[in-house]
Amino acid sequence: MKTILVLGAGLSASSMIRYFLERSETYDWHLRIVDMDVEMVKRKINGHSRAEALEFNALNRDERLPEIQKADLVISMLPARFHVEVAKDCIELGKHLITPSYISPEMKALDAEAKAAGVLIMNEIGVDPGIDHMSAMKIIDEVKAKGGTITSFKSFCGGLIAPESDNNPWNYKFTWNPRNVVLAGQGGAASFIRNGEYKYIPYHRLFNRLDHHSIPGYGDFVGYANRDSLSYREIYGLQNIPTIFRGTLRRPGYCEAWNVFIELGMTDDTYPMIGTENMTPRQFLNAFLPYNASLPVEEKFKQFLREDRIHLYERFEWLGLFEHTPLIGIENASPAQVLQKILVDKLSLSEGDKDMLVMLHEFIYEINGNKFFHTSYMVNIGEDQVYTSMSNTVGLPVAICAKMILQNEINLTGIHLPVYEHIYDPILKELESFDIKFMEEKSEL
Amino acid sequence: MKTILVLGAGLSASSMIRYFLERSETYDWHLRIVDMDVEMVKRKINGHSRAEALEFNALNRDERLPEIQKADLVISMLPARFHVEVAKDCIELGKHLITPSYISPEMKALDAEAKAAGVLIMNEIGVDPGIDHMSAMKIIDEVKAKGGTITSFKSFCGGLIAPESDNNPWNYKFTWNPRNVVLAGQGGAASFIRNGEYKYIPYHRLFNRLDHHSIPGYGDFVGYANRDSLSYREIYGLQNIPTIFRGTLRRPGYCEAWNVFIELGMTDDTYPMIGTENMTPRQFLNAFLPYNASLPVEEKFKQFLREDRIHLYERFEWLGLFEHTPLIGIENASPAQVLQKILVDKLSLSEGDKDMLVMLHEFIYEINGNKFFHTSYMVNIGEDQVYTSMSNTVGLPVAICAKMILQNEINLTGIHLPVYEHIYDPILKELESFDIKFMEEKSEL
């Protein structure tokens, strides 16, 4: 029997837990799951004989260590900042570990120790990061195997609302942590390289510098730049590529409208506004518009939008920004917290709504003097509000990787990403059986 | 004989030192001055028998304490972050201290200790902060004495180039630390209150929300909001005032053009750009503009400006932003550092140039049912590049306050600002003899 210890069982763990439970007889797995919310874990396990809901505090090392000791494999779905502590325990006890999160510098620094202990710590194996690495590396490796040279690589990912549930003027609902959506893009200029020229986009223009794309059967999308595109040159072995760009997908119009929030100053999370507890949405908006004794907020906002963006007006009206109710009801809230409250009231999922995960890669490369444009895209729709697309695309690659480790199909030690063919190839193949499938189109230029 | 110890003798100390030397016989003063640059101190003293250039390290407590012990009064013109340490020494040794800088929370916390020691620590007694406090409080106290209620107070200050030296399209030259000018307004939204409504302006719109003003004989100015206007309600005893606004003055057009730098992302000081050592001004500009294979930088920049701001184009051309020379020549420079390099090359003072300090207050108040609009303004032009307006307006209030303390004309202890009539009144009067004189205009509304 093999024991899998799962630390943290929130939203994105549901599909992974189901995968393990459905295969637990076949592979003789025993699943031990801990989360602050034990009842939630019990619901997800639903009485399955090969699973156990644990009650210890996963953030307490003394409580965690004996549980790791009992496991054959550890999966940390805890918030990313806790992974390094867990990794140190796993190295000490000689246990493999999987996390879906970005490798932090502290995690990277454990590489030699992990190797010395014969331990594999696989990171960035959810979706963005995860499926993006795997699906991109598949094409990059194919092109390299044919002696080709990649001159341009653009890659986009977006967590969106499924077309059948897309019924508001923003063409968006929160399918993931709203706070991250409100703060998206903050913390520094976005940087990338385009035809050999380094480019920098400050936060307050980020949602105005857009890449337009269509995906067959799913319509139009626009992409705004992620903060860091440049480090992917190293990760993907494309050190000298003249164009590399990573972005986030939204439906057309969303980004231009979102930039209005940024321009107004409504996404600032660095200071508390005065009187937010009894503030109306209208007062919130007015606090960012100039004083004018003779113009109502609506007219001042139209002036702010300018003629060329006046078509966005309806989106803001729909959010209730001109209304006197409801009161924000949060003391000393930052602009970002107030905005989040207003948005969550309007842009949350309704019962029956499904989410959608979209990924798109665009390559330009040359092989033997011929130039190709090659796209690869994947659209996945969630099953329901438990087995969401987000849960499937984050959890299933983790689960499949776990199976491969337990079946001794991976012979790596140290700190890794899923950028190796013997890892990404079987995972991408198995993901297809869950309708997480990349379509490719290639044309000669 | 009274001994004055001056810590730090940079640009803004020249006029103060001259004031002390010219009166040293009359008042029997002995001046002891320390600065890292001893030769500069010697030049400023110019062999005067009542002054001494000291060579100790003013930042070292052990070296500083015996010097403070010998003094009757200490003046710290050191960078603001060092004032608190000096203040602690002065309290310990029972010596009065003057600094022109803002009261930090740490300084404020020394109030009880200073009082217990019978020590006065007078702060914010240069120009903005300093002359602004004094000239505003004079009017505020007058209105209050007449039983009036102030409903609006706007106050502006600007360090600019004198009209006779104003010969570039920016109508601006660096008369103060260029780095502070490049970073001006960063670090949080500007907040103020207008007719009872709290208003917030994010940094990227700060230089586009402008107040227009004329000053008789000196033409037009525009003011952008300072970050903090609200705390002045407490300082000036105007707790319930419905409108209070503090701003910085520039010549018309400067702010709109400066906002273009901000919008582009060129004032960001948080990350190093790649390849700045060998970067051209043109490449620097291009890094913030979208890639376009068929448009030159000039055309992309015009598109960025938009039609309504195209009149600003000349300012950027004049700065050499489209040129291939000179190379920036600084490794790993932030955008703000690169911009500063480009600006310093063009906007520095030329020989013979004079600076100008402009201050403007606008009050609206009611007395006995009558409503008044009352302005008070001061324009001061520097004498030369040593006795600049900045040096005069910072150093002379400090010097006059020093004289008053040494003549036992101030009976305060603790941490203070110059907001008391028995302090500001004689200082403002004496400043008039240095051509630092407020003109007032009052009309009934």
Image (cartoon, coloured by chain):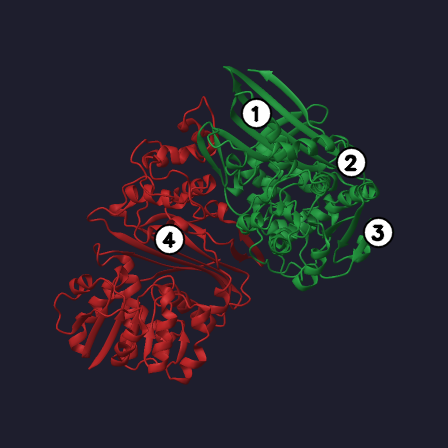
Chain colours: A green, B red
Horizontal relation, residue B167 to residue A142: left or right: left
Front-most of B285 and A427? A427
The numbered mark at residue A133 is none
Labels 3 and 2 touching (C-beta < 8 A): no
Please state if B56 lies on the left or on the right of B376 as rendered.
left
Element under disc 1: strand
Q: Secondary structure at mark 2?
A: helix
User: Residues at marks 3 and 1, common chain?
Assistant: yes
| Crowding at mark 4 (Cα within 10 Å: few <14, some 14-19, many 20+) | few
Read off the residue under disc 4.
Answer: B180
Q: Nearer the viewer, mark 4 or mark 2?
A: 2
Image-quadrant location for residue B134: bottom left
Subunit that carries the residue with mark 4: B
- Amino acid tagged 1: Phe
The chain letter for the residue carrying disc 1 is A
Q: Earlier in the sequence, mark 2 or mark 1?
A: 2
Give the amino acid type for the residue marked by disc 4 in the picture.
Asn
